[in-house]
Amino acid sequence: MNPHCYPIQLSALRTAADIEQALSEPTPAVVEALARLPGDLLVLGVGGKMGPTLALMARKASAAAGVRRRIIGVARFSSGDLEARLQGYGIETVRADLLDRSQLARLPDAPNVVYMAGMKFGSTGSEALTWAMNCYLPGLVCERYAASRIAAFSTGNVYGLTPVTQGGSLESDAPKPVGDYAMSCVGRERIFQHFSLSRQTPVTLIRLNYAVELRYGVPLDLALRIQAGEPVDLAMGHFNMIWQPDANAMVLQALAQAASPAFLLNVTGPELLRVRDVAARIGERLGKPVRFCGQEAPDALLSNASLAQRLFGPPRLTAVEVSDLVADWVRNGGATLDKPTHFEARNGKF
């Protein structure tokens, strides 16, 4: 691990506050990007797994760049102390149900918007709400923020399963979604693309594959199974992932790439990872034997993020470094967010 990548010693993290600070450390490139970006930044759906650290990264990078701007986080803030923590970091907060037109209309204007709202887990059995959140809401947001620059989160699930030998789907590949969640995410993209064309709203669509941190992600899912003596399923035998701060850094830089027609960008790590190999390394780190079940399929949900790496450079942490950090976290009894990724799902049901 390059010691200059982080001013915080990642192996020394213990508390949620430690993690939040580490996950929000901006790269020099993010500082430079936000120095050039004019105006305030609004984060819609700031209450998710990535929202708080993205907002805090933007706050830190703006301060480092000597730029005074409002960073505004919007969510329901229905439980926990997230709103107070964000306010303590100097991030303004607004409570709102984004599906309520009147509440959306009252949100502050902002020339820069990061759209993180959406629904994945729990989509099976709540298909109507999934489509409302992933397709209807983007239309409302595009109408409200037609004059803004928008970086909108999407997902690599829109590509569907691709042959491992292909090396991952490219932005130019046609979507082949499987299941209501992935289909609704294609719908979300189409809505943003429509309004980008009809209103000339500059948009970047972020097709993200597995942003991970110590308390969430595919390595954690594997580590917890190995720790519990449970078998690791090989059916989805390959995957991509990226350290969450590196994903957030790319998203903030991608605001400058927003265009009309909408700009498509895969965001994930450069490695095509084999579940068997990652699990074996984690098991060794944990001092636990690894049991496997199932057979590797010849295809998987995989993205090729070479475009993002040409634009923004490689992630600060490699997949090996991330897996080792997660294994150590689990071995030391670290807390989790208790949100399995369900990365092994091949039927599109979440």
Image: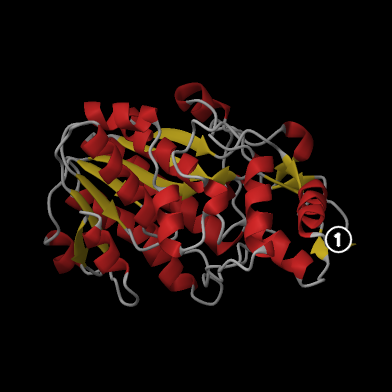
Residue 35 position, x and y percent, is: 23, 28
Q: Is residue 234 visible?
A: yes
> Is 94 above or below relative to 302?
below
Judge left or right: residue 66 versus residue 277: left
Q: Is residue 259 visible?
A: no
The residue at the far top in this view is: 310
Secondary structure under tag 1 reads loop
Q: Which residue is mark 1?
A: 290
Residue, x 49% and y 75% (percent of image)? Answer: 126
Q: Quadrant of residue 326?
A: bottom right
Q: Dividing the image into 4 quarters, which one contains the C terminus?
A: bottom right
Amino acid type at image mark 1: Val
Of residue 162 and residue 284, the one placed in the foreground of this image is 284
Of residue 53 and residue 309, the one placed in the foreground of this image is 53
Q: Dividing the image into 4 quarters, which one contains the N terminus?
A: top right
Residue 71 position, x and y percent, is: 21, 49
Of residue 157 and residue 32, the one placed in the foreground of this image is 32
Residue 163 position, x and y percent, is: 76, 40
> Is 231 above or below relative to 156?
below
Residue, x 32% and y 37% (percent of image)? Answer: 203
Judge left or right: residue 57 versus residue 93: right
